[in-house]
Image (cartoon, helix red, strand yellow):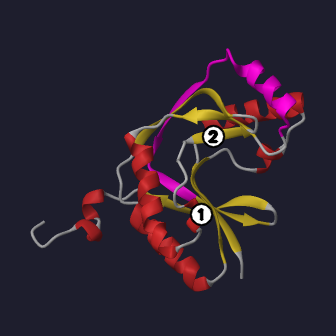
Amino acid sequence: MENLFLICLIPPTSIIEDIDEIRNYIADKFKVYESLKRPAHITLYNPVKITSRDTEERFFNALSTAAFTDSFTQVLLNFNAFPQHTFYLEAEQNPGIMNLQRQIKKALTPLKLDSQRENFKFTPHLTLAFKDVKPPVFESIVNTFKDKKFKRTFTVSGFYVYKHIDKKWQPYKEFPFKNPQDNPATKDLFS
């Protein structure tokens, strides 16, 4: 058994349609297609490979504990890049997304899924082009979008796990947010 999972936020369909229009424009104009193989998403935890049923069960139980949080508003605002390799929409850093990512990381740390990823810096973003983007093409993409504006806002009330099936990321499980005050881990004798 070997499964690959991705923990992420998925914007509403209307916003995904706008994002896909941009991704398709980039693919057609610059001949870079790698980002089209993935759903439009904001990664909350890098993809993890799980090789046992026991670990998979512990993985999903841990994620369930991370879902005790309040809904929040997420803003996608303008274009940016990680130099020379990834072009993206910025996902505004706000207390909601930063807290959610911390909770997921904290819940998964005891599972030791990938110790190299424990210290990565979380920069929320939604990728538009990467992997197959060569430096000269990268510069052309950045220059094309440098003066363009983009802003979409949506409410986040849960997160998703996608599973890699038949060489594609497929929706697998949704974790709707639960009232933080109902979290048994934070209850005390006098609550």
Which amino acid type is marked by label 2?
Leu
Q: Residue at x 63, y 46 (%)?
A: 41
Q: Viewer-nearest of labels 1 and 2?
A: 1
Q: Quadrant of the N terminus?
A: bottom right
Q: Which residue is mark 2?
A: 126
Q: Is residue 151 left or right of residue 1?
A: left
Q: Residue at x 83, y 33 (%)?
A: 135
Task: Please provide percent x and percent y for residue 58.
Answer: 50, 78
Q: Is residue 145 magenta?
A: yes
- In what element is the residue under mark 2? strand
Q: CA distance from mark 1 to mark 2?
A: 22 Å
Crowding at label 1, few (<14), some or many (≥20) Cα neighbours within 10 Å?
Answer: few
Q: Which residues are magenta?
A: 133-160
Q: Is residue 29 left or right of residue 119?
A: right
Q: Which residue is mark 1?
A: 116
User: Quarter-wise, where is residue 143 in the image?
Assistant: top right
Task: Please provide percent x and percent y for residue 75.
Answer: 50, 33
Which amino acid type is marked by label 1?
Gln
Q: Is residue 81 magenta?
A: no
Crowding at label 2, few (<14), some or many (≥20) Cα neighbours within 10 Å?
Answer: many
